[in-house]
Amino acid sequence: SQQGEEDPQALSIQEGENATMNCSYKTSINNLQWYRQNSGRGLVHLILIRSNEREKHSGRLRVTLDTSKKSSSLLITASRAADTASYFCATDRARAQKLVFGQGTRLTINP
Amino acid sequence: EPEVTQTPSHQVTQMGQEVILRCVPISNHLYFYWYRQILGQKVEFLVSFYNNEISEKSEIFDDQFSVERPDGSNFTLKIRSTKLEDSAMYFCASSAGELFFGEGSRLTVL
């Protein structure tokens, strides 16, 4: 299987705190992407990091990739109640190939 | 902003009935996908489609499933004889590099 695990499975923090989610995978990858899913809704693309990149920022999001450890982390800084959602990492092994998703982290931001 | 649209948003059907889920991918995209998410579980790949043929399919995508691009814009997923375990959210996606997902079609099989 291409995909590993995400941890934690669930994370509950106070508004304003930072949230860190981790993702591991098993095989070599081309890209790793993070998606958000609000309950019962579609998948919203957050950020893509290529296998030759180590860190990427987008607004309050910071993604790191360690290909030697086959792991990635997503950091959301200064969390807001609207960040409450499930977050999934997904990997692909080549351009336009299928994405393999992790189990996701369910993030709850308490006001 | 261009988006992938899916219809219906929710369909309830009886076991054994045929279901067709429809998707309109982003117009200049060439790669199309269907994914499935059973409630509370992870998103699973079903099938990818390129150049009017299936390029890859998963073990889930058995003979009960088929995909079609009938008119150059729509991309459909057909389930011939639905089973209870087909109840899930079905997501269409299209790509010219980065994947864009639709909002999903919730299928409930009774």
Image (spheres, coloured by chain):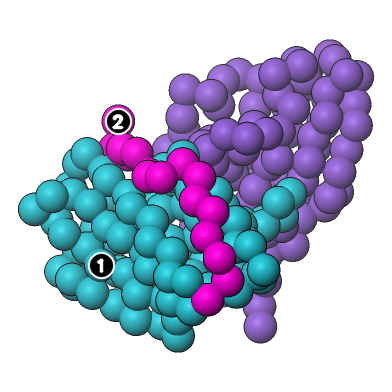
Depth check: give the residue in front, A76 or B65.
A76
**Residue A5 covered by magenta stretch:** yes
Q: Quadrant of residue A12?
A: bottom right
Q: Position of residue B73 (x, y in %)?
A: 70, 62
Residue range of the region highlighted in magenta in the rendering? A1-16
Residue A21 in the figure: left or right of residue B46: left
Q: Which mark is residue A1?
A: 2
Q: Please report the residue visible at 41 percent of the width from the left and 45 percent of the height from the top.
A: A8
- Provide residue B39's location: percent of width, then percent of height: 68, 34
Judged by depth in the image, the label closer to the viewer, 2 or 1, is 1
Q: Amino acid at mark 1?
A: Thr
Same chain for labels 2 and 1? Say yes or no.
yes
Figure colour of chain B:
purple
* Chain letter, disc 1 residue: A
Q: Secondary structure at mark 2?
A: loop
Q: Residue at x 67, y 57 (%)?
A: A38
**B44 horizontally vs A23: left or right:** right
